[in-house]
Image: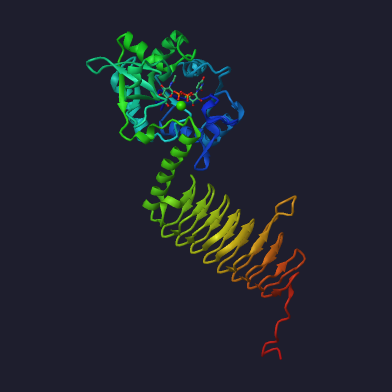
Amino acid sequence: MASGTTVVILAAGKGTRMRSRRPKVLHPLCGRPLVAWVVEQALSIDADRVVLVVGHGAEEVGAAGQAAAGSTPLEVVVQEPQLGTGHAVQVAAGSLEGAERVVVLYGDMPLLRDESLAALVLAQREAGRGAIAMMTARPDDPRGYGRILRDPAGGFERIVEEKDCTPAQRALEEVNLGVYCFDGPALLQDLPRLSSENAQGEYYLTDLPGLAVGEGRPVVTVNLADPHEAAGVNTVSQLAEARWVMQSRILEAHMEAGVLIEDPATTYIDHGVEIGAGTHILPCTYVHTGVRIGEGCEVGPFTHLRSGTVLADGAQVGNFTECKNSTLGPGSKAKHLTYLGDTHIGARTNIGAGTIFANYDGKAKHKSEVGDGVFVGSGTIVVAPNRLPDGTTTGAGAVVTRSADMQPGDVFVGVPARRLPQRATAEES
Ligand code: UD1
Ligand code: CA
């Protein structure tokens, strides 16, 4: 059944304050672009439509948004030129016809929680016809935010953008977070009334609540208790702060699921990593998006697990081991100074200290297969593509070239590595 709610995400801005060529909302936060986090917030509301307003880097931003939305189609609207947040919603007006209510989110607010958004929508519904609900907070540092003006009785009056503030207004502590839920038909009526007569010469979305008050329509403010949720990312330094908060949330969720994280302060785990209960993550470890770790594994200290790594139950990777697009089977170990690239390793195999799977020949990446119960001696280099079948052994310092042709149970030693003749067994002699 239709919920009557449409969400509009504003993501057309350049992000001048980032001083970067990359559009702001494409900057990554814990393994995914800022805009992806906001699309996820939008999907948490039971919305009929999600509209993404793009401009700078339109194609890339649209694609990143759609990737985050998965099978839910986004309506992508291009705002060109970008004349302000109010103008961005004006450009999307065609997609808002018939919506009972419209939630507007800014693409630079990755930390907002689903519960807070749900509370905002509820507040708008309860406030009645024509109402606007908007989020406010009292952050430690209000700089950069629009300030909330209230009348002597404490009623909401209007929002003043910082650049338009008098010194007295600038001293106000309550700020506009830039998250709103509008009555749909009232929004469509009000949008054409915005003017650009202000310090920035822009059409401010933030003038709408003041217009509504002028007409006696209700404007309700929902105060956010946790100021971290309020962070809009405008600068590189704010991006780093937001990453910090998001990282703690991700680690907290893993710890609640029984992952033993010894030192959260030096553990980096991106969005979208699966880790089984009872796995021990030791300090100074970086786990990227797209990694799966089983139960009872040990990772770290000082381990780098990149996309496509899969550790089966009980596998162990230790200091200065980097894995990319590689699998370690149950109980297998690569504990010291090792690079596993495009390598599939079976069960109970030991990868000795200093082993390198040389997967790149300067032109292309190649795969290697390592079987069960293999013993790879310290300092082995395996030139890919290659195969180390079940039960094989390499001697310390062996260089296993592409032409090695190892058979199950073989022992290879030397440079280039050659088959070591097996001693005759008692039965054969
Ligand atoms: C905005 C609010 C401010 C609020 C703050 C909260 C306005 C005028 N001001 O300021 O009151 O305290 O957010 O973080 O809304 N965008 C477009 N098209 C445009 C301009 C912006 O799509 O023409 C997008 C940007 O990509 C961005 C979002 O709107 O994702 C907010 O724009 P930004 O310039 O960051 O607004 P602030 O100055 O932070
Ligand atoms: Ca902002």
Q: Nearer the viewer, residue 366 or 223?
A: 223
Image coordinates of residue 208 in percent, x first then y, are: 39, 14
Q: Nearer the viewer, residue 224 or 91?
A: 224
Please say whether residue 132 is visible from this viewpoint: no
Q: Is residue 155 above or below residue 315?
A: above
Q: Seen in the image, is 174 located left or right of residue 51?
A: left
- What residue appears at the point 52 percent right and 67 percent down from the top-left corner? 331
Q: Quadrant of the N terminus?
A: top left
Q: Seen in the image, is 128 located left or right of residue 235?
A: left
Image coordinates of residue 227 in percent, x first then y, are: 35, 34
Q: Residue furthest right?
A: 403
Q: Is residue 428 above or below residue 313?
A: below
Q: Nearer the viewer, residue 334 or 388?
A: 334
Q: Nearer the viewer, residue 113 or 371?
A: 113
- Which quadrant would residue 157 be assigned to in this image? top left
Image coordinates of residue 389 in percent, x first then y, are: 66, 69
Image coordinates of residue 264 in percent, x first then y, are: 41, 51
Q: Quadrant of the C terminus?
A: bottom right
Please say whether residue 217 is visible from this viewpoint: yes
- What residue appears at the point 34 percent right and 26 percent down from the top-left corner? 136
Q: Seen in the image, is 116 located left or right of residue 194?
A: left
- What residue appears at the point 44 percent right and 26 percent down from the top-left corner? 105
